[in-house]
Image: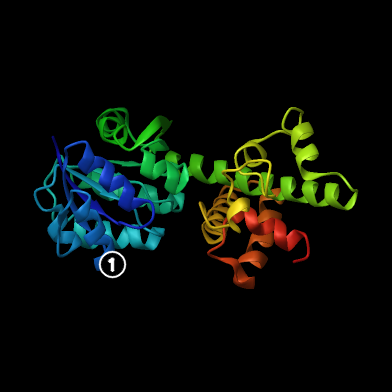
Amino acid sequence: MAKIAFIGLGNMGGPMAANLAKAQHHVIAFDLSDAAVAAAVEKGAHRAASAAEAVKGAEIVVTMLPAGKHVREVYEKDVLPNVAKGTLLIDCSTIDVDSARHVAALAGKAGMEMVDAPVSGGVGGATAGTLTFMVGGGDGAFGKAKQILEKMGKNIVHAGASGNGQAAKICNNMILGVSMVAVSEAFMLAKRLGLDAQKMFDVVSTSSGSCWSLINYCPVPGPVPASPANRDYQAGFTAAMMLKDLMLAQQAASAAGASTPLGAEAAQLFSLFVNSGNSAKDFSGIIKMLDGK
């Protein structure tokens, strides 16, 4: 089994590191939160005092960090100066495409292979080991990374060159954000027209309006028992994280000269929702704002 350094043990990183330890890999864990490290140790990981200490002697480094600036800083200051040539680097953070390609280029110059491998599937998928990984990087690096990613996920998709994993992630989540707004608006219109929510679901779920946001994450209580709407919108995927991804998509669209008017509108709506004190709520909770509550 491999010696794996895992940096970033939040809601997603913690369960992912636990699944690597469960697969009998030697996981050296670090996070700025002592509680997060302690939780990882309880799941079979080994504690490191710093990111630099975690990566020394590691065959593989996995990172799960909040934003591009954190990824750049950790790789430039802690990872690249302290790992041996040939170490495989896997960044599972969701960040801007430019940062992903910048760090991958630095890794290549230092004699290391790197992939960007952002995830989809939420905390439930991270815990169950059923995540989808969208992977950017060379064929050789992808082949090596896939063996590790399969211990944390079910669907491992090679999206192309470095940065393409991030591109796939932000495009996917722009669709998700836009579709959740559309589904929420439709349910609120149905409500005002006197159409029962369950009847609405029964019709749309078997008709042309059906989509993931409706079938798996229906924003009204009742039709989909597992959806956050039945738990007062306790987050599976927070509104703040959705806003982050929508803003990354807008940043990328601006840089690429792409027109994304619906993505831009969704970003504005989620910005209003988040800035109204709902950052920790599930993103499907935006239906309450659209309902005027």
Report which quarter residue 32 is drawn in: bottom left
Left or right, 145 with respect to 199, comes to left
| Residue 132: % across, % down | 43, 36
Amino acid, disc 1 = Ser
Note whether residue 57 is visible: yes
Q: Secondary structure at mark 1?
A: loop
Using a 10 Å C-alpha cutoff, classify the residue at mark 1 as few (fewer than 14 neighbours), some (14 to 19) or many (20 or more): few
Colouring chosen for the image of the structure: rainbow
Q: Which quadrant: the C terminus?
A: bottom right
Residue 179 lies in quadrant: top right
Q: Is residue 172 above or below residue 236?
A: above
Residue 71 vertical position relative to residue 107 in the rendered view, above or below: below
Where the N terminus falls, by quadrant? top left
Q: Residue at coordinates 22% horizontally, 63% vertically from top-left? A: 77
Of 154 and 161, nearer the camera is 154
Q: Nearer the viewer, residue 83 or 27?
A: 27
Give residue 129's position: percent from left, percent from top.
36, 38
Looking at this view, is 115 or 149 the one in front? 149
Q: How many marks?
A: 1
**Residue 254 visible, this orientation:** no
Please name the residue that numbered disc 1 is placed on. 33
159 with respect to 238 (left or right): left
Picture quarter containing residue 113? Answer: top left
Q: Position of residue 150 (x, y in %)?
A: 31, 32
